[in-house]
Image: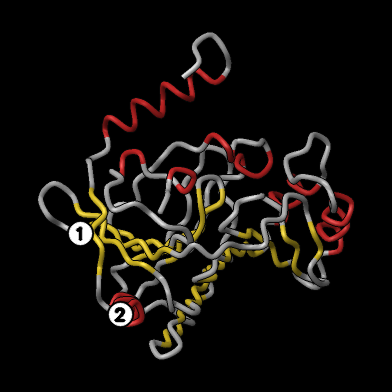
Amino acid sequence: MRIGNAEAPVALALDTLAMELPTMKCVPIAEDPKQVTRRHLADAANGWSVGGWGAIGEFQYDPDEPGLSVDLEALSAASPRGALHIGELNGAALFALVDDSGRTREIAFCSPRGGAGRTTIHELDEAIFDLGIGAPHIDMMVRLRGDDAATRAALRAGAGRPLLEPGNPAGPAIVQASPSRIFASALARLEVHQPIPAPGGRSPEGAAQPSAAAISEGEAGACPRVALAGWLILWAEPISPDTPLATLAPGDCHG
């Protein structure tokens, strides 16, 4: 931690949060990943997240919500609020995050397989743009409506540039239009269809992501480490079984 510069308040906040978080241990799970996934996907009480700090999507469904579709054979769930599609799990390592009382609070699905790793905005097709967040294990994209010409023009103007580059029109346009966001790892693809929350606002229930500040103001790299207690996590990189949750972040994981 460097005192005397702009990073000090952030570092102090992280240190304080780390001391408040309960210590959890990663315990390997030998059960077949598909069986674990199928069992927990069937229970609406469970939630899922795909991503890393600054680029993470969350999905949870209500059993009686309109438009809900859960396919346990295909390992997918979708509603008007968002969707989760779990892909190939061969080679995935599972770890239970267990608290001091012995209760499993989260399950991490881990793989060394990476993503595209783009560091600038790319147009993948007429509707989908990769935001180029540069994470080795997560690709974050947006899907535009067919009639959203203004956001498409802004993203094309920002193509080939980092999302958070000063003057890039893509970030503000995304916040304004709030298109569907896509978080893709080697193991799963999660989509958020709900509006992006305003800076300082709460994420909506169901499918959600961090606030607009993470996109438009460059705060993604300084996100606090928040424990998603009670949620299932689909990470896409290996986690050491001895790593405590209080210090666990995608950049800290190692095999």
Q: CA distance from mark 1 to mark 2?
A: 17 Å
Q: Name the foreground residue: 185 vs 146.
A: 185
Q: Is residue 208 left or right of residue 127?
A: left
Disc 2 target residue: 32
- At mark 2, the secondary structure is loop
Label 1 amino acid? Thr
- Residue 217: x and y in percent read 67, 36
- At mark 1, the secondary structure is strand
Q: Is residue 152 left or right of residue 201?
A: right
- Residue 206: x and y in percent read 44, 64
Furthest residue toward top: 4
Q: Residues within 10 Å of mark 1 (few under 14, many from 20)?
A: some
Furthest residue toward left: 101
Residue at left offset 80%, top offset 73%: 146
Disc on res. 104: 1
Residue at left offset 41%, top offset 25%: 13
Residue 187 vs 18, above or below: the answer is below
Residue 137's image quarter? Answer: bottom right
Q: Earlier in the sequence, mark 1 or mark 2?
A: 2
- Residue 35: x and y in percent read 30, 82
Label 2 amino acid? Asp
Residue 20 vs 182, above or below: the answer is above
Residue at left offset 60%, top offset 36%: 219
Q: Is residue 218 left or right of residue 104?
A: right
